Amino acid sequence: MMPVEIKKGLWQLPVVDWNVRDFHGYSVYQGTTYNTYLAVGDKITLFDTVKKDFAGDLLGMIAKIVDPAKIDYIVVNHAEPDHSGALPAIVEAVCPEKIFCSAVCKNALMDHFHDDTMPFSILTNGSETDIGGRTLYFMETRMLHWPDSCFSYLKEDKVLISSDAFGHHWATSERYDDEVDFSKLMRQCAKYYANIILPYSNMVQKVLSSVSSLNLEIDVIAPDHGLMWRKNIPAILSAYDEWSRHCLKNKAVIVYDTMWKSTEKMALSILDGLKSEGINTELMSLTHNHRSEVMTDILDASVVVFGSPTLNNGMLPSVNDMLCYMKGLKPAGGRIGGLFGSYGWSGEAVAEMKEYMVKAGLEMPEEPLKTKYVPDSDVLDQCFEYGRTLARHSAAKICV
């Protein structure tokens, strides 16, 4: 990719990782981008780096604008290796005067690289620093989504470099939000939020409030992953506000796996019951849907229903994997949970699933449904009524 000039003397340096498909358990089936930013003035400042394997690509892009050795400062907004992995190689090539970061970020970088020769200069929350004709306003955004996460705002340019916030995993040749299909872009942003940011929703609310109180003029939001925002800034800010407040839609998600189709038959009858009450319902088989896609649909669902047959006195491994993953992401927010499954001679799966659902913060107003072997018409009628009842419980939780 070629560098993109955002404002005069301010460049995005996008390293596109077209072929990555997994991001610590998150399916990035359309790749991702590691964005860095270069401010060229009386002093030259690089914002963040990239994954270790792409250090050469980054240096090559910098060289299209300036000699990398002329870089004076590096700003590290986030210590996670997809943004700092190349830092040692870049520091060796550049020999910067200063590496600006927060105290928390410095400690994280030391724990990663064990190098006390790096010329760290600590910035505090709300501090302003001249970086050669530009004013850098530095904002700590702890736990969005690491303890060291920070924003950098360039006052004269009206550009917010937002680290992982407002980003998404999507490898494209386009660089701005208004150059791609908006619905596809928002799906990728929802997926990113649901699978990475969701547990830190309380912090998102604090950050949005802080940004609003500062009355920052923002022409461009420049995240470290994906496309930059210049047209739809109100839309992404509004989406983060809704997602972080757990605003729920008139929507249910049924997540299940099945052995001999008995649990699937129950799922279909529950779906019919939910639909009969006017609730939009997604049916997601774990044989055919990745956990990160399932979480994307759970993000704004008011009802979440899990089903599994009993195997070896427990739930199916695929369901266990999904529930463990969801528990860590803490969907909560008043969502209604439901459970169902078939069994042969023991039936422990629903009890196991309930433990996970409660720990994930879902409300469980009804007892789970389970049936022995193949559900008959009476059981399927019970499943239908179960779906209707869950839909009625959810009505008070819907806020979108």
Image (cartoon, rainbow, N blue to C red):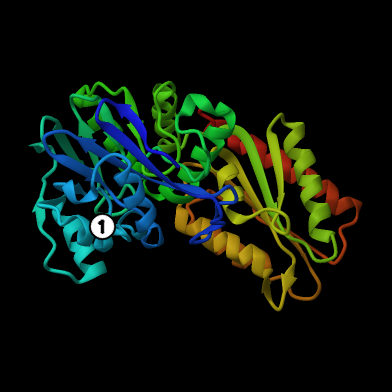
Q: How many marks?
A: 1
Residue at the extreme right of the image, as rendered? 377
Q: Is residue 83 left or right of residue 227?
A: left
Of 329 and 27, nearer the camera is 27
Instruction: Give residue 234's position: percent from left, percent from top.
Output: 40, 22
Q: In this view, does 86 lie above or below 203?
A: below
The amino acid on which the numbered mark 1 sits, given as a three-letter code, is Ile
Please identify the quarter of the rendering in which residue 14 is found. top left
Q: Mark 1 points at which residue?
A: 90
Residue at the extreme bottom of the image, as rendered? 312
Q: Is residue 198 left or right of residue 39?
A: right
Query: Which residue is depicted at the point 40% across and 32% down?
Result: 228
Give the secondary structure at mark 1. Answer: helix
Of 97 and 288, nearer the camera is 97
Instruction: Give residue 292's position: percent from left, percent from top.
Output: 57, 52
Can residue 400 be seen here? no
Q: In this view, does 297 lie to the left or right of 194?
A: right
Query: Which residue is depicted at the point 12% across and 37% down?
Result: 126
Of 268 and 185, nearer the camera is 185
Mark 1 burial class by Cα count in 10 Å: few <14, some 14-19, many 20+ = many
Instruction: Give residue 263's position: percent from left, percent from top.
Output: 79, 59
Instruction: Give residue 273's position: percent from left, percent from top.
Output: 77, 39
Q: In which quarter of the image is the N terminus?
A: top left
Q: In this view, does 37 lie to the left or right of 356?
A: left
Can residue 162 be seen here? yes
Of 160 and 300, nearer the camera is 160
